[in-house]
Image (cartoon, rainbow, N blue to C red):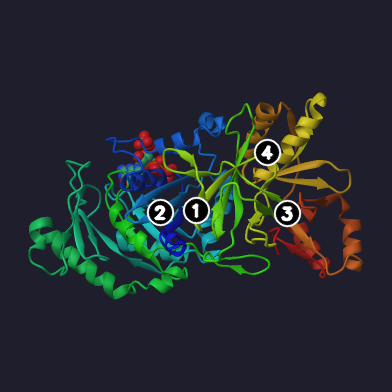
């Protein structure tokens, strides 16, 4: 198959949702359609995620939270589909944000009863910043939930979407009879008594066809006709360009647990979802079709094997082909590296791969060369943009609790920060180290991993920080900057890249500082 055909058949996407909306279950059903796993009757929903990721981190098993992000690839029709799994837990939101830099599109799962939840709003905001094409899947139709039109309104209002329903439910909960697929003009009935069997879809080009009532009853047929009429009046027609530009979001209804409505979603997804998209770098826009390889690290997995403490860096191929045993330029280090055993990921296994194409994710064994955001190329100096650090929410001093293990502690902290577990700030005044995290849980993760992987012990001390802001000055000699540096010395730190950060202790003090030193800029992210 030609290089351009390989690109054209790839779809790399992520599924996002508030925890418990059904992301894992949907992932599992998609894999079933792809034949990547076998039908096992009522497979427990979290099974895939757990078996695919729990080897990576013991801590995840202990806590029952998916700490890690995994990659699951499968084939459907002639397409190669890469699902980048994202942790739903809010304390690992930053991990999800970074994964979103590597997807070309997104499916958002919403619970029909709960509607749009907090975590969904946050994640969608990040997608919208990058204009990522989004499809919505409204899940759990076998349960009583909100009225479909109310829910569509809620999705538009809370997520800022312009929705286009491409399927519509017939009843809900106890009365749920199936869906009408507006995309293909088909009816698919739900067999409550036999959930493992999915009835074949029936073509219904004309919803006014009188035989409709023989399948769903007079009443339901009349309601469906009214609703479909309303849908076509109220919502715009599907427009591929608008979807790809992130300006229109198709919606599907179904029940992931019952494998219902999932095929409609998948069939439409493979048709409309984007092929690997160009990516901007500091230097220029890089197109997938370019001959020369380029890619970037969006995720580092540690502790694949605790005995060897090796890590796996996940690279998204942006352009060209990534080939085994070929030297590539590690741009930040300015040196060439080659990889003898790059991994490709499938639902149930990972295997060594000789060639990977744009859109693919390659796992590279790493002994400490990679950081999140690093770029690899065939030789060109490129820096892919778009993996910023956000201000952490929680800050604590980190202290060495075992003086004999200072070196191990330093190394452990260094590597955990490279993985993006948390952010490290070093105070300008006294060199004390401060850890900043998105969720309180990460402090425990860090403590646990330092002990189990590096043999080091740490303790924490509270520190009152409202927000970390990256400081930009027009000139280091500017009087505002000089005074600011003197007056606020106690609150200044360097991040791991050596950038200056102001650790404001309250919203008020941040505002005052901004007003007082007007020549300076205070940025909410590390990329400005
Ligand atoms: P998540 O990854 O988004 O956190 O959600 P997950 O798939 O784990 O699903 C959360 C719960 O919702 C699971 O139940 C799952 O079985 C259930 N669920 C998913 N899809 C549907 C659906 O279409 N209909 C109904 N009724 N339930 C659904 P659980 O009891 O928490 O877990 P389990 O014991 O079933 O594994």
The alpha-carbon separation of the residues under discs 2 and 3 comes to: 31 Å
The alpha-carbon separation of the residues under discs 2 and 4 comes to: 30 Å
The alpha-carbon separation of the residues under discs 1 and 4 comes to: 22 Å
The alpha-carbon separation of the residues under discs 1 and 2 comes to: 9 Å
Residue under label 1, please give it: 360
**Spot occupied by residue 480 in the image (x, y as percentages of width and height):** 88, 67
Locate residue 107: give its quadrant.
bottom left
Q: Earlier in the sequence, mark 1 or mark 4?
A: 1
- Towards the viewer: 92 or 325: 325
Find out if the beta carbon at label 4 lies less than 8 Å from the nearest ligand 1 atom.
no
| Residue under the point 81% across and 46% down | 426
| Residue under the point 24% across and 62% down | 181
Q: Provide the secondary structure element on which disc 3 rests.
A: loop
Q: Is residue 410 above or below residue 418?
A: above
Q: Residues within 10 Å of mark 3 (few under 14, many from 20)?
A: some
Q: Residues within 10 Å of mark 1 (few under 14, many from 20)?
A: many
Q: Is residue 10 above or below residue 57?
A: below
Residue under label 4, please give it: 367
Tell me whether the residue at label 1 lies in contact with that at label 2, contact meaning CB atoms closer than 8 angstroms.
Answer: yes
Q: Earlier in the sequence, mark 2 or mark 3?
A: 2
- 267 left or right, relative to 401: left
**Spot occupied by residue 322 in the image (x, y as percentages of width and height):** 56, 53
Tell me whether the residue at label 3 lies in contact with that at label 4, contact meaning CB atoms closer than 8 angstroms.
Answer: no
Q: Is residue 390 visible?
A: no
Q: Is residue 406 above or below residue 29?
A: above
Q: Residues within 10 Å of mark 4 (few under 14, many from 20)?
A: few
Mark drawn on residue 80: 2
Tell me whether the residue at label 1 lies in contact with that at label 4, contact meaning CB atoms closer than 8 angstroms.
Answer: no
Q: Is residue 133 visible?
A: yes
Residue under label 3, please give it: 332
Q: Quadrant of ligand 1?
A: top left
- Towards the viewer: 446 or 481: 446
């Amino acid at each position: 198959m030609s290089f351009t055909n390989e690109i054209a058949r790839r779809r790399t996407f992520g599924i996002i949702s508030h925890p418990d909306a059904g992301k894992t279950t949907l992932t599992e059903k998609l894999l079933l359609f792809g034949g990547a796993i076998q039908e096992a009757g009522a497979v427990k929903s979290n099974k895939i995620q757990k078996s695919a990721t729990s080897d990576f981190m013991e801590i995840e098993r202990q806590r029952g939270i998916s700490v890690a992000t995994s990659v699951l690839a499968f084939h459907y029709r002639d397409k190669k589909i890469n699902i980048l799994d994202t942790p739903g837990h809010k304390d690992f939101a930053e991990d999800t944000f970074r994964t979103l830099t590597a997807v070309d599109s997104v499916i958002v799962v919403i619970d029909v009863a709960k509607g749009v939840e907090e975590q969904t709003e946050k994640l969608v905001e990040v997608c919208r910043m990058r204009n990522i094409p989004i499809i919505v899947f409204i899940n759990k139709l076998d349960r009583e939930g909100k009225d479909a039109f109310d829910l569509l309104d809620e999705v538009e209002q809370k997520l800022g979407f312009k929705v286009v329903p491409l399927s519509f439910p017939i009843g809900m909960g106890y009365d749920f009879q199936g869906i009408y697929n507006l995309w293909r003009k088909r009816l698919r009935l739900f067999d409550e008594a036999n959930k493992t069997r999915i009835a074949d879809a029936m073509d219904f080009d004309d919803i006014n066809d009188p035989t409709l009532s023989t399948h769903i009853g007079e009443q339901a047929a009349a309601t469906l006709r009214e609703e479909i009429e309303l849908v076509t009046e109220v919502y715009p027609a599907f427009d591929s360009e608008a979807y790809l530009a992130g300006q229109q979001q198709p919606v599907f209804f179904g029940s992931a647990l019952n494998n219902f409505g999932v095929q409609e979603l998948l069939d439409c997804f493979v048709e409309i979802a984007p092929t690997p998209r160009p990516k901007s770098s500091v230097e220029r826009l890089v197109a997938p079709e370019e001959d020369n390889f380029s890619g970037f690290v969006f995720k580092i997995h540690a502790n694949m094997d605790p005995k060897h403490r090796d890590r796996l860096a996940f690279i998204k191929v942006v352009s060209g082909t990534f080939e085994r045993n070929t030297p590539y330029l590690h741009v930040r280090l300015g040196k060439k590296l080659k990889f003898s055993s790059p991994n490709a990921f499938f639902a149930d296994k990972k295997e060594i791969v000789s060639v990977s194409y744009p859109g693919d994710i390659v796992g590279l064994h790493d002994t400490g060369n990679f950081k999140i955001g690093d770029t690899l190329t065939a030789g060109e100096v490129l820096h892919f943009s778009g993996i910023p650090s956000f201000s952490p929410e929680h800050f604590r001093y980190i202290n060495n609790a075992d003086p004999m293990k200072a070196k191990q502690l330093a190394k452990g902290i260094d590597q955990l920060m490279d993985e993006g577990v948390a952010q490290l700030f070093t105070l300008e005044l006294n060199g004390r180290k401060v850890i900043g995290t998105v969720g309180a849980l990460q402090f425990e993760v860090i403590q646990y991993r330092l002990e189990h992987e590096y043999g080091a012990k740490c303790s924490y001390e509270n520190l009152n920080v409202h927000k970390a802001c990256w400081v930009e000055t027009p000139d280091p000699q500017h009087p505002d900057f000089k005074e600011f540096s003197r007056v606020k010395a106690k609150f200044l730190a360097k991040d791991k890249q050596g950038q200056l950060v102001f650790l404001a202790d309250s919203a008020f003090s941040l505002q005052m500082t901004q007003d007082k030193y007007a020549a300076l800029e205070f940025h909410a992210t590390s990329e400005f």
